Image (tube, rainbow, N blue to C red):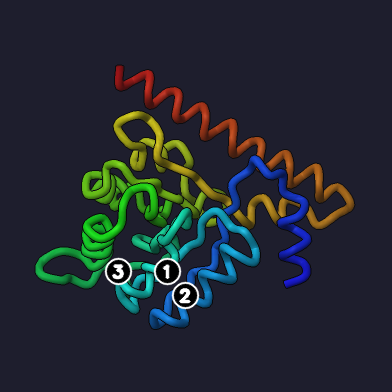
Amino acid sequence: MDVLALTFQAIPADIPVILDAKRGDVPNTSAAYADALFDSFHADAATVAPYVGLDSIEPFTTGSRYALVLARTSNPGAGDFQDLEVAGRPLYERVVERCVERFGADRCGFVVGATYPDEARRLRALAPDRLFLMPGVGSQGGDVGIALRAGMDANGGGVLPSASRSVLYASRGDDFEKAAGDAARVLSEAANAARAAATAGSR
């Protein structure tokens, strides 16, 4: 916790912070988790697991809080449960539908893996005005250009691609800081180029 607090202190105030907490529990426990993430650590958003139900997500959406609900995750085993059919549709689509019905676009977005662009396209149709956090770029093999084109909203935005290991472990040597910065810069430039190309092609 001390390291996390120090990390927060090092982040400039104008940079939004998303805590990849993947919390989700009965409502009173979720409320305690949300208080810790948003009030103690002052996160701007947090990832939330929806399995316990909509009332477990609610505490992460009150006031100025913002929840990024796990919909289609980036891991190879994502389909073990997320692909199960619920009334003729995969579970991950039902999760998005129910959250869109319950929570406003200013309080709730979704985690949609960059490794599953076809699913991202379907979810964008169900949630046209929501932010998609798209992990899986880099070490997991997701292509930032393909992911952006699949997940972008009608205005050419609504997508935040994310890479972790390819940045964090860019180097294990003394040049770690520079290597991590370079890796993050390459991702940012690739994302911006893909977004520009996609929006230019839609005009």
Query: Foreground mark, 2 or 3?
Result: 2
Query: Foreground mark, 1 or 3?
Result: 1
Name the image quarter holding residue 2.
bottom right
State the quadrant of the C terminus.
top left
Residue at the disc numbered 3? 82
Q: Helix, strand or loop at disc 1? A: helix
Residue 52 drawn at (x, y percent): 34, 79
- Label located before the other in sequence (1 or 3): 1
Label pair 1/3, CB-CB below 8 angstroms: no
Name the image quarter holding residue 149.
top left
Residue 88 drawn at (x, y percent): 10, 66
What distance separates the C-alpha of mark 1 from that of mark 3?
23 Å
State the quadrant of the N terminus.
bottom right
Q: Helix, strand or loop at disc 3? A: helix
Residue 106 drawn at (x, y percent): 38, 48
Camera-nearest residue between 2 and 110: 2
Q: Helix, strand or loop at disc 2? A: helix
The amino acid type of the residue labelled 1 equals Pro
Residue at the disc numbered 2? 31
Is 60 drawn above or below residue 14 in the view shown? below
Residue at the disc numbered 1? 59
